[in-house]
Image: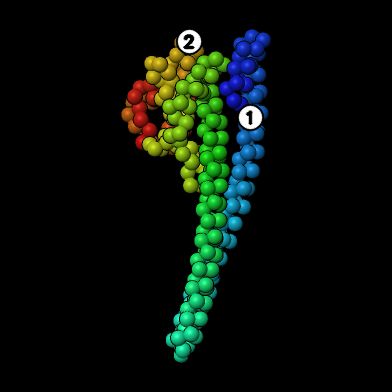
Amino acid sequence: MDLAAIQAILDGEGTNEEKSQKLFAAHESDKKALEASKNKILEEKKALQKSQEELLSKIEPEKKAYEAKVQELEEQIKKGGSEEAKAAFEAQLNRVQEQSKAEIAKIKAEIEEKDKTNAALRERRRLDKVHLGVESAMSKANVTDPEKRQELRKAFLYDYENKFKLGDDDTDPVDDEYKTIDERMLAYVATPSGKTYLPANSTGGGATGSTSTTGKHNTLSREKFNQLSPKDQMDFCNKGGTVG
């Protein structure tokens, strides 16, 4: 869902609750569309990888055939006898070399093109996951007001959209410090400026859960941090905790 569509809902008729429901419905629709997009991209990626493997498999046989032909012609040149015969074999050798180089260069160019296409598909997949992850992270951080969500979305993506990378196996995006979108969002809304996106008298966190004090520990492993409720994750970040 692009910003223009979000703005249209916010500027439209209805109460904030009705607008929230419209945004939620649109968000759910986007989730389904992104899932379909993910599946399509993964299928396209598999097809590209297969095509690339087939192209790579052609290079070695081409090189071996070329080397064998060159060796054969070089032997013929040695045995050619007359200068005219040697010149003819050398001309044939040059043609073979040029033809083989052209064939190998063509295959390499096709592989490079496949790599570019694969990179473009991966970037689409990354952006899909980042944008969907931001929507989910805002909900977990208890950012409920539609207008505040729009403002936070723009601010957060401005700072972080290009910092999150996919893992080699298309795992969920993490940044250079291996922080997830959820972790970055919770830390973001824990700052003085970030707290302005939260409801009044809220410390963040979209669900109730264990109320155990997390501030006793300055550092938690990612596994332990993920086991906390969103509220406890927010409390932990507010108290200066770090995820190791």
Percent across and percent down for residue 131 are: 54, 30
Label 1 close to label 2 by CB (< 8 Å) = no
Which residue is rendered at x = 48% and y = 10% of the image? 200
The residue that disc 1 covers is 30
Which residue is rendered at x = 52% and y = 40% of the image? 123
Q: Mark 2: give few (<14), some (14-19) or many (20+) Cα within 10 Å.
A: few
Give the quadrant of the C terminus. top left
The residue that disc 2 covers is 200
Q: Secondary structure at mark 1?
A: helix
Q: Nearer the viewer, residue 96 or 104?
A: 96
Percent across and percent down for residue 121 are: 56, 43
Percent across and percent down for residue 152 are: 49, 20
Q: Is residue 233 left or right of residue 34?
A: left
Q: Is residue 226 left or right of residue 118?
A: left
**Does residue 30 show up?**
yes
**Does residue 211 show up?**
no
Compare marks 1 and 2 and give the one earlier in the sequence: 1
